[in-house]
Amino acid sequence: MYVELNHIQKRYGNYQASDDVSFGIEKGKLIGLLGPSGSGKTTILRMIAGLEHPDSGEIRIDGKVVNDIPASKRGIGFVFQNYALFRYMTVYDNIAFGLKIQKVDRKTIASRVMELVDLIGLRGLERRYPSQLSGGQRQRVAFARALAPNPQLLLLDEPFAAIDAKVRQELRSWLKEMISKLGVTSIFVTHDQDEAIEVADEIIITNRGHIEQMGTPIEIYRHPQTAFTASFFGQTSVLADYQKYHTFQRMDGVEKAIVRPEFLKITRKNEVQKYGSSASKGVVERTSFRGDWIELAVRVHGDLLIAKRDLEEEPITVGETVDVFLYRLFVIAGEKCYLLENQSLQDDSVFI
């Protein structure tokens, strides 16, 4: 593993920011640290960078213990969410800053800066000041400045937080492509699930100072191992008694069940429901346009379930009685999470 954290503990007064945190990251991977506010993700990032020090435990980078190595000696590039560019320096001078600190010769600096200006797509803007750039352009300059000294590890703290939604979407794709091209090991902190799923090779889920789960976005999304991970992704609905819904296996010790919108199929009474005998009756309480789909809030057996319906399908109105088929759900027993599929599903089910 290129980056390793072993049994890291970090406390601020009564707040346990890191509680026995251990994980490893392979060289060249783009890792997303994902969790709610206060879950400890930024503390982990800052300890790797050397901006904070663990109370106990070991941090290794490329096989070397770095606990006592200052941040400036770790060979790490750091990108902050607020850009942290020098306002009175041009794009060129901002990118060149780290190289000048290292006393690199002027010719090498010029070559490296222009290489990065081309990489971030800002050729012709190198003499502008940050105030003359858009938010997306400023963040690209921040990336280039962090990359200028050729770090072997790039850390990014909420890198898209200060950017509007459309530009943020564009920068996600750009960042993933850039990191893949450069092959630099990278870790970014985010609380945006879509961002982590789209950008990261692997995701580390943090909660209350500890690691809930680590894996690829697909692995974590489809196979959550804990109650927190199952409920964290998406707009989930909670069922106190899943046995009210038809044809699910009974399990002992289940405290609740969690349902995601894609686990449901909502049909009008005049539409064919493939698994009609296992469907429940529901009443639509709310419809919301979400761009390329309609969100439905449906009351079923006293539970309010959130579902999706394609725009191409016949509209469903508030107050309408509908059939609700539940394909699958996550059941929670203690801190464990298990996936149950509706027993009426056949091997050739259209649901994936």
Image (tube, grey):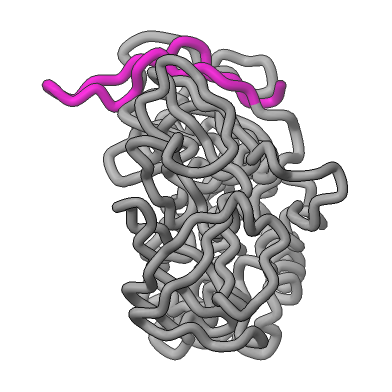
Which image quadrant: the N terminus?
top right
> In front: 104, or 52?
52
> In front: 143, or 200?
200
Residue 16 on the magenta span: yes
Kindly identify the residue that appears in the image at 70 percent across and 42 percent down: 344
Q: Is residue 244 left or right of residue 96?
A: left
Kindly identify the residue that appears in the image at 53 percent across and 47 percent down: 188
Q: Quadrant of residue 60?
A: top right
Res 70 seen here: no
> In front: 149, or 247?
247
Furthest residue to the front? 277
State the predominant SS element of the stretch in magenta: strand
10 above or below 235? above
Q: Position of residue 194 (x, y in %)?
A: 55, 59
Kindly identify the residue that appears in the image at 47 percent across and 78 percent down: 165
Furthest residue to the left? 14
Number of residue marks? 0
Kindly identify the residue that appears in the image at 34 percent across and 76 percent down: 286
Residue 248 on the magenta span: no
Q: Which region is colored magenta?
A: 1-24
Q: Position of residue 163 (x, y in %)?
A: 43, 75
Q: Quadrant of residue 172?
A: bottom right
Q: Position of residue 301 (x, y in %)?
A: 35, 51
Q: Position of residue 73 (x, y in %)?
A: 53, 31
Res 69 seen here: yes
Q: Is residue 56 left or right of residue 118?
A: left
